[in-house]
Image: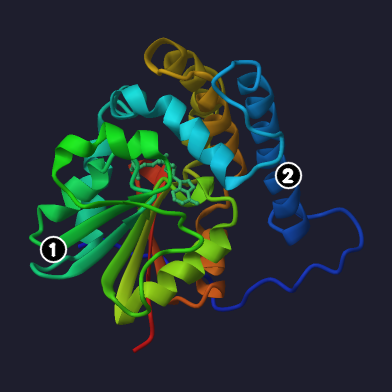
């Protein structure tokens, strides 16, 4: 039986704006978020030197899509190498957390090549992969799952149509994750569920130190050998570092309107599954 964690009953008081920010304060989170944006700008600066990428230096949705177009060719292989094969276990665990039943309708947002969608479809549910990177979708065209090219911040679906929605390692990459969380809520049926799979913060301090060193130093090097666009993995490292930890993300999901938000750690907290429900 899995243990699901929930945020403490009392949230810390809102920041006053005076003094130095505490590590968990909104000001500190904003500083980290700026770090992501800065990392993204550096990545884009390096990419615009190539003729095939004409993005501006602001983080715009089409620039995110272009970055993923650039990694699409060896994306799944790179993932499996960088995670030592654990990505398969994480996808299996996500399918279990979704508790899908045959005939249910499932949205897999930011699905990339559809590797996660294929895993979820094993349940007998009807699963659609949505992503705005044409390159990622094209790379997964052989998988035989329905695919839709669309922006997660403006989904082309009616209200209340999906039994479950999920986003796997994609929320961190969406320009405004709160808008995406609200869009996912809109298209979910009352009583339906959400599972977010995302890199997170290991709970055991010594492991956290080793993990951080891996993410910042080793990961970009290994990606340099395997990936079709190694620069994107510098962004990956920076964005993982800047992403909220488990309780902060739970608050954010609840803030978008989801109820009964809980999380479960995988691989010691390197990955967390957050689950929530749309009130019926
Ligand atoms: C790290 S990949 C994850 C792919 C897949 N879910 C998996 O588990 O391997 C992140 C994906 O998010 C997509 N993405 C980022 N922002 C998006 C948005 N606003 N709308 C749709 N897809 C988006 C990217 O195109 C990319 O394919």
Mark 1 residue CB less than 8 A from any atom of ligand 1 = no
* Residue matched to label 2: 34
**Residue 214 in the figure: left or right of residue 77:** right
Q: Is residue 247 left or right of residue 141?
A: right
Q: Provide residue 19's location: percent of width, then percent of height.
A: 91, 58
Q: Nearer the viewer, residue 5 or 122?
A: 122
* Location of mark 1 (residue): 125
Does 35 sit above or below residue 162? above
> Is residue 22 shown above or below 191?
above
Residue 66, position in %: x, y?
A: 51, 33
Quadrant location of ligand 1?
top left
Q: Residue at x 21, y 38 (%)?
A: 141
Residue at 88%, 64% in the rendered image: 17
Outermost residue, right side: 18
Q: Is 134 placed above or below 20 here?
A: above
Name the secondary structure under disc 1.
loop
Q: Nearer the viewer, residue 71 or 249?
A: 71
Q: Nearer the viewer, mark 1 or mark 2?
A: 1
Q: CA distance from mark 1 to mark 2?
A: 39 Å
Q: How is the image coloured?
A: rainbow
Q: Earlier in the sequence, mark 1 or mark 2?
A: 2
- Identify the residue at horizontal 49%, vertical 18% (top origin): 230
Residue 241 visible: yes
Sort mark 2 into few (<14), some (14-19) or many (20+) by Cα contacts within 10 Å. few
Q: Position of residue 219 (x, y in %)?
A: 47, 22
């Amino acid at each position: 039986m899995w243990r699901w964690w929930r945020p403490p009953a009392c949230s810390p008081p809102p920041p006053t704006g005076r003094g130095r920010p505490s590590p968990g304060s909104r000001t500190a989170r904003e500083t980290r978020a700026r770090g992501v944006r800065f990392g993204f700008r550096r990545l884009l600066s390096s990419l615009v030197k190539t003729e095939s990428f004409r993005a501006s230096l602001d983080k715009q949705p089409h620039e995110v899509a272009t970055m993923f177009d650039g990694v699409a060719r060896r994306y799944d292989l790179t993932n499996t190498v960088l995670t030592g094969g654990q990505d398969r276990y994480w996808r299996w665990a996500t399918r279990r957390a979704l508790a899908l039943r045959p005939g249910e309708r499932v949205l897999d947002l930011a699905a990339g090549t559809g590797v996660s969608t294929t895993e979820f479809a094993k349940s007998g549910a009807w699963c659609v992969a949505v992503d705005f990177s044409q390159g990622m979708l094209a790379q997964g065209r052989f998988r035989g799952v329905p695919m839709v090219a669309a922006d997660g911040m403006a989904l082309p679906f009616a209200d209340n149509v999906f039994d479950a929605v999920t986003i796997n390692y994609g929320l961190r990459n969406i320009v405004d994750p709160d808008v995406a969380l609200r869009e996912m809520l809109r298209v979910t049926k009352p009583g339906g569920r959400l599972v977010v799979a995302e890199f997170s913060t290991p709970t055991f301090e010594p492991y956290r130190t080793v993990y951080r060193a891996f993410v910042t130093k080793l990961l970009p090097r290994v990606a340099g050998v395997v990936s079709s666009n190694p620069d994107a993995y510098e962004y990956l490292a920076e964005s993982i570092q800047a992403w909220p930890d488990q309780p902060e993300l739970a608050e954010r999901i609840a803030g978008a309107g989801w109820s009964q938000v809980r999380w479960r750690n995988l691989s010691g907290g390197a990955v967390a599954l957050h689950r929530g429900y749309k009130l019926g």
